Image (spheres, rainbow, N blue to C red):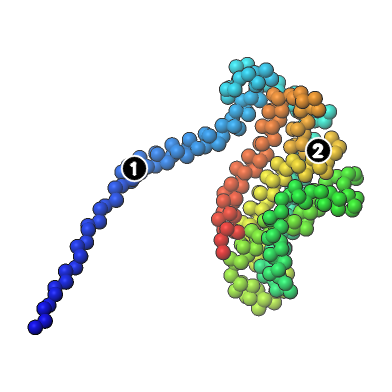
Amino acid sequence: MMATQSMTAPRRTPAVPKPPSLLERLGPKARAIAWSVLVIGILLIVLYPLAWMFGSSFKAQSEIVNNFSMFPTEFTPGNYPEGWNHLDVSFGRFFINSTFLALACVVGNALSCLITAYAFARLKFPLRGMWFSIMIGTLLLPHHVLIIPQFILFKTFGWVGEPFPYTPLIVPHLLACDAFFVFLMVQFMRGIPQDLDQAAKIDGCSAFGVFRYVILPLSKPALITTAIFSFIWTWNDFFRQLVYLSQLDNQTVPVALRLFIDSTGQSTIGPMFAMAFVSLLPILMFFVAFQRLLVEGINTSGLKG
């Protein structure tokens, strides 16, 4: 006689419900208010240095050193005209130089990087993958490591100095030297269906025709992103412009701001803050004007695929 053993299933412990978080306990309106307060608080922290610099541009030099509050106790609007005419050359000349250099680099980067990206993304040529990997590898090299060999090379070409001192700052951008923008556009073009290329070729388009009528119109978001970042980076560039520009008439805004501090260590802080705030206005206006297109370009370009 065989005994039958009854097997009982193990008891399951009832799941303990997870307590709701603080945001979940709040209503939708309260959560919106909490997020708004948090975002405004972060915004105030980020904008405080800019607000402090703007307030300090209306302070006397002694008050800037001794008074660290945002608002001046003695309103000094004379810092702006004094800073504008502080150097032997009007500060407006530096604005013209920076604007010309930034726009030239924007055009050079947009055209050269777009053509190079089209070759990597759509054309087939020997060792394409190897050359693309080498280009991406240049992103690992710091700019300070390359400045000496680049200076020697440009000096050998006769590009440093007169008659056109901006040659070493503009020509490299005409040769797709910024691998970041090439990579960004390549990733964007890889997201464009290749069926459009095939349809254009059936209609009789060559490789240039596909680029002209298909890729170029659809690459507007990537082009705008490249233009915005190129303008901001060139406008704020200090080191390369300091190396290649020696004449005062050719200096740009970042280098001119450094001239407010002389060799003896004496500085004209109030006018320097005034001109520093004025130099931020083109970037702020440029960013505000193209903010929507910038966000659209980042969302639809090189961060996917």
Disc ID at residue 67: none
Q: Position of residue 204 (x, y in %)?
A: 70, 77
Disc ID at residue 22: 1
Q: Position of residue 27 (x, y in %)?
A: 32, 43
Q: Quick check: 178 above or below 194?
A: above
Q: Position of residue 298 (x, y in %)?
A: 58, 54
What amino acid does circle 1 point to?
A: Leu
Can residue 107 be spotted in the picture? yes
Q: Quick check: 4 above or below 164?
A: below
Quadrant housing the N terminus: bottom left
Q: Which residue is mark 2?
A: 251
Kindly give the residue lying farthest to the left in the view shown: 1
Q: Element type at marker 2?
A: loop
Kindly give the residue lying farthest to the bottom in the view shown: 1
How many marks do you count on the picture?
2
What amino acid does circle 2 point to?
A: Gln
- Find residue 211 and report its image quarter: bottom right
Left or right position of 247 against 213? right
